[in-house]
Each structure stands twice: as C-alpha cells, then as structure tokens.
Image (tube, grey):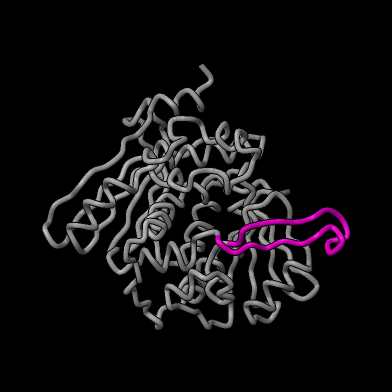
Amino acid sequence: MTSTFQADAAISVNETSERLVARLIDDAARLHVDVTRTDGGTVIVDAGVDAKGSADAGILIARICMGGLGRVARRVAFDQAPLWPGFIEVHTSNPVLACLASQYAGWSLSATKEQTGGKKFFSLGSGPARALACKEPLFDELGYRDRHDRGALVMEVDRLPPQVVIDKVLNDCGLAPEHLVIAVTPTQSVAGTVQVVARVVEVALHKTHVLGVDLAEIVEGSGSAPLPPPAPDGIQAMGRTNDAILYGGRVHLTVKSDAVAKRLAAELPSSNARDHGRPFADIFASFNYDFYQIDPALFAPAEVWVSSLESGATYLGGKIDHALLEKQWSAS
C-alpha cells in the first residue's frame, strides 16, 4: 500500500533534540557518562563502554533518539508485581517522525579490520542524524529529510566508533566534525538497557509499516515496558531487552479509521509470530545469531490497544506473558 503520510518539513529532529544533546554533555558528571572529542572536534559520549552510565542517561539518550519529539520516563510500580517493579513509559504526538525518521536503528555502519587497524566494527545507527544522511529507503517513503547543521547519532555497541566510521557519518550527514555528537550505549549497560526498552512504541510503528498500513493513519502513540536489570553478557542483555517488549510491552495507538484499528489489534502483537513463547536469547541462538532468520512478526509489543477516531472504539490484541518474564529475570 502506498503511504499518504506527509512529513512536516518545518520540523527538524536534529534541532528539536539539540537542547537534550547539550544537557547530556553539560550534565556528564551527574549522568556518569564520559565526554571526549576526536582530533577533529566530534563529541563522543560514552554511556556504558568504559563509563558507568546511568538510567537517567539512558532516558535522556532515548529522548534524543526520538528527535526530541517524545516523552520518556521511568516509573516504579510495585503494584504490577509479579511482572516487574520498574517500567519505562513513552509517549509521542509525532509518532512517525519520532519513531521511524529518528529513533529506528536502521543505518548500518561498519568497517573492516583493515580500515580500523584492529578488529572489524559494526553498529546500527539510530537517532536524528539518520534524517540528515537519509541512507535508508525508508526516508523516500516518508518524504522527509532534515537539513540542520548539527546532528546526533546513537550507537548500540560495546566499543567506541573508529575514526573511519565517524568520517563516514560526517560525510553522509554533511556536517562539520565539531557539529556531530555520537552517544554509545552497549546493550549490557544500564543506559543501553533503558534506551532499548524505550523503543516499545517504535517497534509498534515499524511493524505497522511492515504490515503495509498507511502511516498517515497513526495519530498518537504511547507505550510501556518493564525495565530489567542489565545482564553482563551481551547476548543475555539483548534477550532481556527484547523480551521486555515482546512479552511485557504494552502500546496504545490512536488511528484515524476503524478498519485500521481492528486490523492492528489483530495483526500487530508479537503473538502472531511462529517463535512467540520462547525467550528471545533462545530464539536468537537457534538461528545461529542471525537476526534476519527470525520471523519479523516477532518484533512487536506483547499487547496492543488501538483507538479509532472514526468510531471512538478501542480494540485490544495480544497479552502480557508474566510467567516467561518472571522465569527469565527472577533468581528464584
């Protein structure tokens, strides 16, 4: 289906997130992140490689990832036991731009060991700088390109990016070195865990796009997911953050038409996937750690509420899997 979505060209996701980027740098000590500059002046924010990082840093980075167009907060909810005491909550009134044009980790950035002078590097870039480079076909579909003179990128990787990758980002974004900020958040870090779980609405938007639903239908997006503790192993950490969304994530979308609301409630939840019901780390291992062999239908929230502006009705699909999460995360 051809999308009728029309992006508001007056909105710059890099400009609207600029004050959040400045706060991340200015509050580095309080947030337990390390800020350094390359010889060219590019700012690198280490939020979990060598730095301790923090949940507050993860929340701020998640807001930067959304291009400043979303709210992200941590909530303590012991009344939700036995699911989990801590949750991440997300809301955006610009769901397509915030989630797909900015937050989605869709920019593949890699370098060979010859290029790095050591070992090969790979990361998926997310955040507002993606909309400056527009290297993904998605931007043609959205009809959106940011033209701001500053940019911020987030990399979910366990090492700082080599200069060859930084140079590629600068070139593709058309930025002066001193006008680029790159935040690095390993999944097994506190900040990394937070910023991945904060993608609960983005995951719903991406699957909506995969289902071929006209993105112009999506008016508002809210969601929550339990925040697990980081795992020291990268694969385990990836498993926990994905399980938080696939089995504990709840999303509420507001759409224009009743037909779309009914369809999304039925087709969007992760329970539609063939591998649903197994921990993500186990699924990942069973496919030899190849993301692209996993059923794409799995990448979705556990529970979806969809409200129709046309009829005023709200439709519910999917459900939370308390037992799976408790078994995976609890020591007993």
Image coords of residue 217 (percent x, y): 27, 65
Image coords of residue 288 (percent x, y): 65, 38
Identity of the residue drawn at 57% across and 31% down = 282
Nearer-the-camera pick, 180 or 306 = 306
Give left or right: position of 51 versus 313: right
Identity of the residue drawn at 20% across and 47% down = 315
User: Does the magenta run of residues contain 117?
Assistant: yes
Quadrant containing the N terminus in the rendered view = bottom left
Image coords of residue 131 (percent x, y): 52, 73
Identity of the residue drawn at 35% across and 56% down = 91
Place residue 82 in its image quadrant. top left
Place residue 281 in its image quadrant. top right
Identity of the residue drawn at 37% across and 41% down = 272
Which residue lies most toward the top here? 332
Give left or right: position of 57 versus 303: right
The mark total stands at 0
In this rendering, the answer to whether 235 lies above or below 311 is: above
Image coords of residue 107 (percent x, y): 59, 64
In this rendering, the answer to whether 324 lies above or below 54 is: above
Give left or right: position of 105 versus 79: right
Where are the magenta residues, as a range? 106-125
User: Does the magenta run of residues contain 214?
Assistant: no
Nearer-the-camera pick, 105 or 81 = 105
